[in-house]
Every structure is written in C-alpha cells, then in structure tokens.
C-alpha cells in the first residue's frame, strides 16, 4: 500500500470515528435535507445556513458506516465559507472523480481520501449521500429571497 493510500485510510478512520461539524442547526434561516441509503443503512441530515451567498454554517447529524460519516464530515469542512457556485462546482468535481476517469481536482483537498470507494459501486452511495443532502439543503436556501428594496 502506498503512503498516499495510508494517509487516505487514516483520514477516513479519523473523520469516521470523530466527525467534524456534528450536530443540528436551528433557526428559520437553516436549510436542511435528509439522505437515506437503504443499501447500507446510512442516514444523514445536513443543516446549512447561507449568509451573503456563502455557506456560513454547515453541520450534519446521522449514523451509518465509516465512509458515509467520514464523507459528511470532510464535506462540511470543505463547504464551509464557500459560495453557492463553488459548492456546486465541488460537487461536480467529486462526481467526476467517482464516476469518470477524470483526474482528481486539487481543490477537493482531503475529500480525495474518498476516491478509493470508486472501485466499490455500493460504497459510492455511502460517499455521496451527505453531498446529495447538502445540495438539496442548499437549493432550499438559495431560492430567490423576497427583495427588501
Ligand atoms: Zn454506508
């Protein structure tokens, strides 16, 4: 096993057992969406708050396998402070890495630790679960707001 594989395994283990940004967000400005992966029994709810077009807060709750929890944890770290467009681009990059032969994009950072699941189609669902939930929470939040002008 290469050093990189070792590093990736450690990252998944670390974030899978000690997830970052874990917990729920409350308030009427919070978008939330739930993702369920019946194949594996993973369940995750992502909470997201936008401010001035950027992700101000993002947290998640749920339970599932190490891959699904690690992915949610790494994703929340990655999305923090990003604009809606950046989040959408990161999601496209992540999908490209998982579903095509596309060369992994640097900007995915630690999330690249998850690219090893590519070889296991059922695990890909675990790795993308929180991302689907985050994107739908984001859609709720980025709907045109009522103008106050
Ligand atoms: Zn899973």
Image (tube, helix red, strand yellow):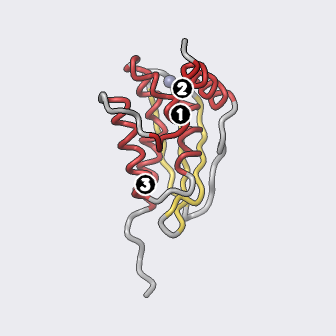
Earlier sequence position, callout 1 versus callout 3: 1
Query: Quadrant of the image for the N terminus?
Result: top right
Estimate how packed mark 2 is, as few (under 14), some (14 to 19) or many (20 or more) residues with alpha carbons within 10 Å: many
* 33 or 10: nearer the viewer: 10
**Which of the labelled discs sits on residue 7, or is there none?**
none
Per the image, the residue denoted by label 3 is 86
73 sits left or right of 148 in the view: right
Mark 3: secondary structure: helix
> Which residue position holds label 1?
71
Q: In the rendered image, which residue does mark 2 sit on?
A: 67
- Looking at the image, is 37 positioned above or below residue 78? above
- Crowd rating for badge 1 (residues with CA inside 10 Å; few <14, some 14–19, many 20+): many
Q: Which residue is drawn at the image coordinates 40% and 44% (left, top)?
A: 91
Is the residue indicated by label 2 positioned so its CB lies within 8 Å of ligand 1? yes
CB under 8 Å between discs 1 and 2: yes
Q: Residue at x 59, y 21 (%)?
A: 9
Q: CA distance from mark 2 to mark 3?
A: 23 Å
Residue at (64, 32) in percent of width and height: 15
Q: Position of residue 57 (x, y in %)?
A: 60, 56
Of pointers 2 and 3, the one earlier in the residue sequence:
2
């Amino acid at each position: 096993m290469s050093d990189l594989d070792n590093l990736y395994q450690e990252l998944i283990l670390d974030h899978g057992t000690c997830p970052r940004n874990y917990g729920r967000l409350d308030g009427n400005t919070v978008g939330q969406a739930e993702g369920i992966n019946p194949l594996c029994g993973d369940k995750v709810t992502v909470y997201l708050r936008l401010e001035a077009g950027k992700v101000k807060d993002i947290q998640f709750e749920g339970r599932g396998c190490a891959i699904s929890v690690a992915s949610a944890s790494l994703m929340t770290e990655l999305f923090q402070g990003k604009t809606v467009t950046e989040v959408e681009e990161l999601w496209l990059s992540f999908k490209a890495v998982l579903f095509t032969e596309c060369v992994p994009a640097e900007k995915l950072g630690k999330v690249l630790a998850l690219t090893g699941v590519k070889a296991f189609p059922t695990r890909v669902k675990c790795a993308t679960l929180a991302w689907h939930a985050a994107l739908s929470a984001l859609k709720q939040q980025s709907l045109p707001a009522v103008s106050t002008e």
